[in-house]
Image: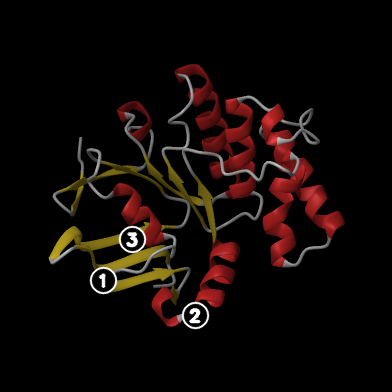
C-alpha cells in the first residue's frame, strides 16, 4: 500500500431511499501513484463527487477499503481521520469555501496553523504560495473583495500550501468563464507538478481530462479506464 498515495479495494457505496437501497458505486478498485494526475469523468449523478468524498475520507464506503498514505481510513477515529487528511490531502471545490471574515493570507495559513506551525512560519509559506498563484497584491483582501478567479486561485493555494500527498479537486472552475478557468487550471497544474503531489480531478471538460496522465469514467457505478 505504501507505494500508492490512495488505494481503493472493492469499494461499494449505497444510499437508503425509504425501503430501497441505491447502489451509487460498485466494486471500485483504484490506485493513485505519487505525482500522478488522474481525471474522473462521467454524466451528472454518476457518483463522481461521492467517489471523491470517499477518497478523501469525508465519507465511509458501505463495503471495501480505502487507504490514504498507507493508512486504512476505517481504522482511524474521526479526530485521527481529520489529522491525517490535514497532513496528506488538499481539497479544491467548485465553490471556493474561503472563510469570508478572513483575508486571503489568513485563509491560506489556516491549514498550517492547524498542523501546528508557528504564525510566522505559516505566514511565510502562505505569502510564498499566494505569490506563486499571482495574488501577491491581494494578501490582505477578504474573499468578498476578490474576483471569482482570484478566489479560486486562493482556494488552490490553500489546498497546496501544506504540500499534500494528493489534491482532490471537484469541478474547481465550474463557476468561472473559460478564460479565467484556464488560468486557474494552469496555476494548479504548474504547482502540482512543482511540488510533486498527486491530483485527482473531477471534471466535465474533455480538453482538461486529456491533459491528465489518465482518465477514468464512471458508468453505472463502475469505474472504467478510457484509452486512446
Is 39 located above or below residue 167 in the figure? above
Q: Is residue 88 left or right of residue 142?
A: left
| Disc 2 target residue | 77
Residue 134 visible in this rendered orientation of the protein: no
Image coloring type: secondary structure
Farthest front residue?
18
Label 1: element kind: loop
Q: Nearer the viewer, residue 174 or 215?
A: 174
Residue at image x 66%, y 33%?
133
Is 113 located above or below residue 35 in the figure? below
Is 169 located above or below residue 132 in the figure? below
Q: Is residue 106 left or right of residue 74?
A: right
| Disc 1 target residue | 62
| Disc 3 target residue | 31
How far apart in space, not on screen, are marks 2 and 3 (Cα)? Answer: 23 Å
Front: mark 2 or 3: 2
How far apart in space, not on screen, are marks 2 and 1 (Cα)? Answer: 17 Å
- Which of the 4 image quarters holds residue 45? top left
- Which of the 4 image quarters holds residue 28? bottom left
Amino acid at each position: 500500500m505504501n507505494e500508492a498515495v490512495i488505494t481503493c479495494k472493492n469499494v461499494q457505496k449505497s444510499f437508503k431511499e425509504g425501503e430501497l437501497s441505491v447502489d451509487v458505486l460498485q466494486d471500485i478498485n483504484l490506485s493513485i501513484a505519487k505525482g500522478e494526475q488522474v481525471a474522473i469523468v462521467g454524466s451528472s449523478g454518476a457518483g463522481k463527487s461521492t467517489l471523491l468524498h470517499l477518497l478523501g475520507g469525508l465519507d465511509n464506503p458501505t463495503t471495501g477499503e480505502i487507504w490514504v498514505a498507507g493508512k486504512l481510513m476505517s481504522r482511524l477515529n474521526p479526530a485521527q481521520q481529520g489529522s491525517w487528511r490535514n497532513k496528506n490531502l488538499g481539497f479544491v471545490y467548485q465553490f471556493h469555501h474561503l472563510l469570508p471574515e478572513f483575508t486571503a493570507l489568513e485563509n491560506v495559513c489556516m491549514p498550517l496553523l492547524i498542523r501546528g506551525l508557528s504564525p510566522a512560519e505559516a505566514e511565510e509559506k502562505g505569502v510564498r504560495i499566494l505569490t506563486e498563484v499571482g495574488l501577491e497584491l491581494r494578501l490582505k483582501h477578504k474573499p468578498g473583495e476578490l474576483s471569482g478567479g482570484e478566489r479560486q486561485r486562493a482556494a488552490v493555494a490553500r489546498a497546496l500550501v501544506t504540500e499534500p500527498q494528493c489534491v482532490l479537486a471537484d469541478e474547481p472552475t465550474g463557476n468561472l468563464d473559460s478564460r479565467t478557468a484556464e488560468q486557474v487550471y494552469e496555476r494548479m497544474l504548474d504547482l502540482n507538478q512543482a511540488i510533486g503531489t498527486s491530483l485527482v480531478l473531477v471534471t466535465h471538460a474533455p480538453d482538461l481530462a486529456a491533459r491528465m496522465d489518465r482518465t477514468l469514467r464512471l458508468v453505472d457505478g463502475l469505474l472504467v479506464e478510457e484509452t486512446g
